[in-house]
Image (spheres, rainbow, N blue to C red):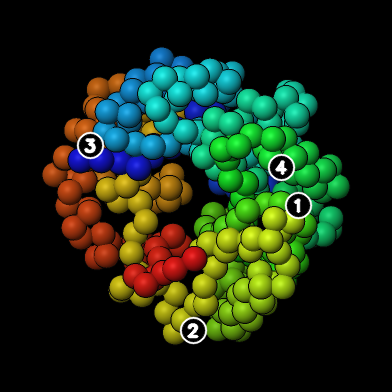
Amino acid sequence: MKLFRVTLDTNPEDCNLGCIMCEEHSPYSDYIPRLYQETGVKRRRMPFEWVEKIVKEAAELGAKEIIPSTMGEPLLYKGFERLFPLAQKYGLKVNLTTNGTFPKKTVEEWAHVIAPASSDVKISWNGATKQTAENVMLGLDFERAVENVRTFVAVRNRYPEACRVTFQLTFLQSNMHELADIVKLAAELGVDRVKGHHLWAHFEEIEPLSMKYSPESIALWNEYVAQAFDARERYLKADGQKVVLENIWPLQAERTVLESDECPFLDKELWVSATGKISPCCAPDKLRDTLGDFGNIQSTSLSEVLQSPAYRNLVENYKQHPLCQTCNMRRPHDYAK
């Protein structure tokens, strides 16, 4: 049995921004103080020896990629730079999601470390204008973020087989009116792909921001999708290539998840939390628990999880699970980029 990749939540509580939709770092979240109150732990950080074990097991299962923490900012992880030679040792690439602030080093320094050893660098991006982007990603300096991307892409282009660069969006009613302009900006900056997902509304305060909130918001979303594809045709990168659009498709007004929509993760990816808990997907932490207990990396191998009755049952029957019936990540069976 093969995996495509494994995500390691190396340092979920370490971040220098406060994005409004983030499960842990949003101003609406009490996750971090509650974590400390319940466990006495202020910051969960994965021991690097676990990282070594997971990367080795992933390679043995045929994985192609490793993703460091998608919660928090992975560049703040103490062992982050050690991940690249480790992945290279086992023939894997790093697939990185970062908030684009590039802390602790210059952008150029990070780019020379990251670009040649990564498959994809997804930069969190939530607007085409300063006001929109900074209202979503609290603490962001939008102009600096733009220059960071410009610099990173310039360094990336010096390497013949370097990573793809992606804008990673959260689809919100407060930023998707700029979707077409984000595609245009991506083309101008040499960003290869614009990808995103619909809002997981962790807090009541942001539920109305979902593009799935009402028939009216769904209709608006469908207009924005059409505008984005038009922008893809009109605005090309300097090399003449179109920006790739991913996870951007019209929604059905009457149902937001169809029976035929497919899970992109099962039998392809696994997640390991900073405490070692193994999960089958990236659903919010508490919701993920409803899918079952798949063990802990301290006592269970990735191979054992994939072959376990609990996991095989989920693979066969996920469409009947209440969480999966509302999942923002499921894709149309005929989905094409």
Q: Is residue 136 above or below residue 140?
A: below
What amino acid type is highlighted by mark number 4? Val
Cβ–Cβ under 8 Å for marks 1 and 4: yes
Q: Mark 2 points at which residue?
A: 253
Mark 1, other Cα within 10 Å: few <14 / some 14–19 / many ≥20: some
Q: What residue type is labelled 1?
A: Leu
Whichever of labels 2 and 3 marks the residue nearer the N terminus, that label is 2
Which residue is tagged 1?
Answer: 189
Is 203 in front, or is 93?
93
Q: How far apart are marks 2 and 1 (CA)?
A: 34 Å
How far apart are the two marked residues, 2 and 4, measured between alpha carbons? 38 Å
| Residue neighbourhood size for the residue with mark 2, other residues' Cα within 10 Å, grouped as few (<14), some (14–19), many (≥20) | some
Residue 298: x and y in percent read: 30, 21
Residue 151 drawn above or below residue 137:
above
For label 4, the SS is helix
Q: Mark 4 points at which residue?
A: 153
